[in-house]
Image (cartoon, rainbow, N blue to C red):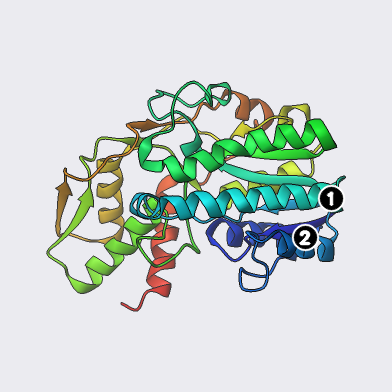
């Protein structure tokens, strides 16, 4: 198959590009925003027309830290909705037989759930701390259903826990949460900083997904597009989480940072718990083996040690 990868120069996209390169698929990585601005409908049309793909893997997004998606809430909402609308419209017009494949971040789920099941997406409000980005993620299944109703367009989608791993931004305000923590710890260790500050109380529980593992699941799914178990969005889940405090302690140990951790309790915690139900995932991917979490964290730390000037 011919696969067009959108957002292939970003964090998740670079991990997906590496995994796709090891398959037999013909892969086209779309240019970056300077040459293919997906918020512009004509640019999106041109990109998809030039590639003529069988599958469009969409990893394009404007996202960052809790602080980023709050301070720039309107911009985050606007850009992400425009990208999604333009991608679906362009595919429907130009290659209606193509499949759109993408991750859906778990911030789309209600913020007060104990566990995130696929059928619980609409059982409450998105946590306000991620309202701008989470709302656009919640619209992804809606767009998929509407374009399937009218155009017969097929979507392959996965709900994902917070992702981490190599190739993310070195800017803590833009990087995903665990990646930003690894980068800050690497810097603090190198500079022998006496303390680092972490937002919140340390009590929220988070499940984590190593980005190369997402890429592996996606590549396997591309070879099983007719599988009925993939007809609706599916959790990529291990059904296990760590408190933020446990996470900070693990990253400090792996980086060798021995300074003080100061918790800024005046800063928001975000949703209290984000853990994904794994029942349906295990039915569809019974033999999938996730990367050991400690090993994934070490790999992420090694990445930041290689790219940061410390």
Q: How many marks?
A: 2
Extreme residue toward the bottom, this view: 309
Residue 202, given in percent of the width and then of the height, sits at 23, 40
Of residue 101 and residue 253, the one placed in the foreground of this image is 101
Give the quadrant of residue 132: top left
Of residue 139 and residue 165, the one placed in the foreground of this image is 139
Which residue is tagged 1?
93
Q: Residue at x 22, y 61 (%)?
A: 257
Label at residue 133: none
Give the quadrant of residue 33: bottom right
Residue 35, given in percent of the width and then of the height, sits at 67, 73
> Which quadrant, please, contains the N terminus?
bottom right
- Left or right: 297, with 53 as reference point: left
Q: Is residue 209 above or below residue 44?
A: above
Residue 5 in sight from this viewpoint: yes
Q: Residue at x 79, y 30 (%)?
A: 149
Q: Residue at x 49, y 20 (%)?
A: 123
Of residue 304 and residue 171, the one placed in the foreground of this image is 171
Give the quadrant of residue 217: top right
Are the residues tagged 2 and 1 within 8 Å (C-beta)?
yes
Which residue is tagged 2?
45
Say few, some or many: other residues with alpha carbon within 10 Å of mark 2 (under 14 / 14 to 19 / 20 or more): some
What is the CA distance from the residue labelled 2 to the residue labelled 1? 9 Å
Residue 27 in sight from this viewpoint: no
């Amino acid at each position: 198959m011919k696969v067009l990868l959108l957002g292939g120069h970003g964090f998740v996209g670079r991990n997906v590009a590496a995994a796709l390169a090891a398959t037999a698929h013909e892969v086209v990585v779309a240019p970056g925003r300077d040459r293919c601005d997906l918020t512009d409908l004509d640019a999106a049309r041109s990109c998809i027309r030039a590639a003529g793909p069988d599958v469009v893997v969409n990893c394009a997004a404007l996202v960052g830290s809790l602080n980023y998606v709050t301070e720039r809430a309107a911009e985050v909402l606007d850009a992400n909705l425009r990208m999604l609308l333009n991608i679906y419209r362009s595919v429907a017009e130009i290659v209606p037989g193509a499949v759109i494949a993408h991750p859906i971040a778990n911030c789309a789920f209600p913020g007060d759930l104990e566990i995130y099941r696929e059928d619980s997406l609409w059982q409450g409000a998105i946590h306000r701390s991620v309202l701008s980005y989470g709302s656009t993620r919640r619209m992804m299944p809606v767009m998929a259903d509407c374009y399937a109703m009218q155009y017969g367009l097929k979507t392959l989608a996965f709900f994902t826990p917070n992702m981490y791993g190599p190739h993310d931004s070195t800017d803590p305000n833009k990087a995903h949460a665990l990646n930003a923590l690894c980068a800050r710890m690497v810097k603090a260790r190198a500079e022998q900083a006496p303390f680092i500050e972490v937002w919140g109380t340390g009590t929220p529980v988070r499940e984590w997904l190593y980005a190369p593992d997402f890429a592996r699941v996606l590549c396997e799914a591309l070879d099983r597009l007719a599988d009925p178990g993939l007809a609706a969005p599916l959790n990529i889940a291990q059904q296990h989480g760590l408190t933020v405090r446990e996470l900070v302690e693990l990253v400090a140990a792996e980086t060798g940072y021995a300074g003080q951790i100061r918790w800024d309790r005046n800063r928001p915690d975000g949703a209290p718990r984000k853990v994904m139900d794994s029942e349906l995932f295990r039915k569809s991917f019974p033999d999938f083996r996730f990367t050991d979490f400690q090993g994934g964290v070490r790999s992420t730390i090694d990445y930041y040690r290689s790219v940061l000037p410390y």
